[in-house]
Image (cartoon, grey):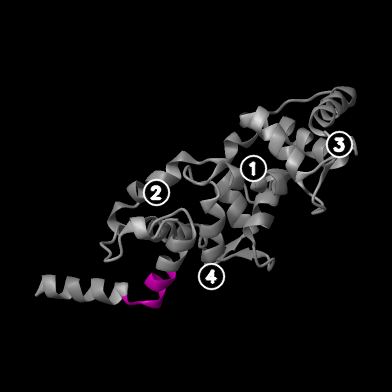
Amino acid sequence: MHSIKSCFCLLKARNSPRFEDHVILAAETTFNVNEVEALHVLFEQLSSSIIDDGLIHKEEFKLALINSESKNNLFADRLFELFDLKKNGVIEFEEFVRSLSIFHPDTPDEDKIAYAFRLYDLNHTGYIEHDELKEMVLATLGESNLSLSDDAVEAIVEKTLLEADLNGDGRIDLEEWKEMAARYPSLTKNMTLPYLREITLAFPNFVMETEVPDSALVF
């Protein structure tokens, strides 16, 4: 009787709208269906850490990312902005999965490089300009609890622009950023989260047997 009930529950899960949505997300991201299921469990935990409404608010995002809901952090703010694909001030599950997919080890480097460029393009102009670069350098130093003089920071910014700005227009475009990332792979090192490949190990009870092979769902 118990096994019949279990089969019925599994059949119901496979035909539920949520499961169908997860199949679609797996087909359109680097994750497979089991990984999307595990990410849903993680999402439910994060989205109820402060406000239990099935959405990740900025305070919850920062609490998970930097263990502080109020601390100013440029990188956390920028990541939240990029994760919030609908630009409505919250992160829904689909946005969460699609954005995290960029950080999967199997995502092409070209996608990671382009995403990192958007992270640095604070003003959304399609360029990384002097002031944006300086702001990110200061944020990086702050993350490491380092303090440099204004002259030293300016020297870093000028040196970076001199090396990256190949056409001499005083700013870095996407193609110039790609060239620089090719020379310095460390620029995008933080764009890969190895544990995303093992996300189902964190939530082993939520691995589902699906009739759709994962190989057919991951492009």
Q: List x then y, in percent, for residue 20.
A: 39, 72
Q: Which residue is at the front of the view, 205 or 7?
A: 7
Sequence-first disc among 4 and 2: 4
Name the residue at 28% across, 61% down: 208
| Residue matched to label 4 | 53
Amino acid type, callout 2:
Ile
Question: In the structure shown, which secondary structural element does the residue marked by tag 4 occupy?
Answer: loop
- As measured in the structure, the alpha-carbon distance from the residue carrying label 4 to the one carrying label 1 is 33 Å
Is 59 drawn above or below residue 11 in the view shown?
Answer: above
Viewer-nearest of discs 4 and 2: 2
* Residue where numbered disc 1 is placed: 113
- Give the residue pinned by disc 3: 167
Residue 68 located left or right of residue 39: right
Q: Nearer the viewer, mark 4 or mark 1?
A: 1
Q: Can residue 49 be seen in this view?
A: no
Mark 4: few/some/many CA within 10 Å (<14, 14-19, 20+): few
* Location of mark 2 (residue): 199
- State yes or no: discs 4 and 1 in contact (Cβ < 8 Å): no
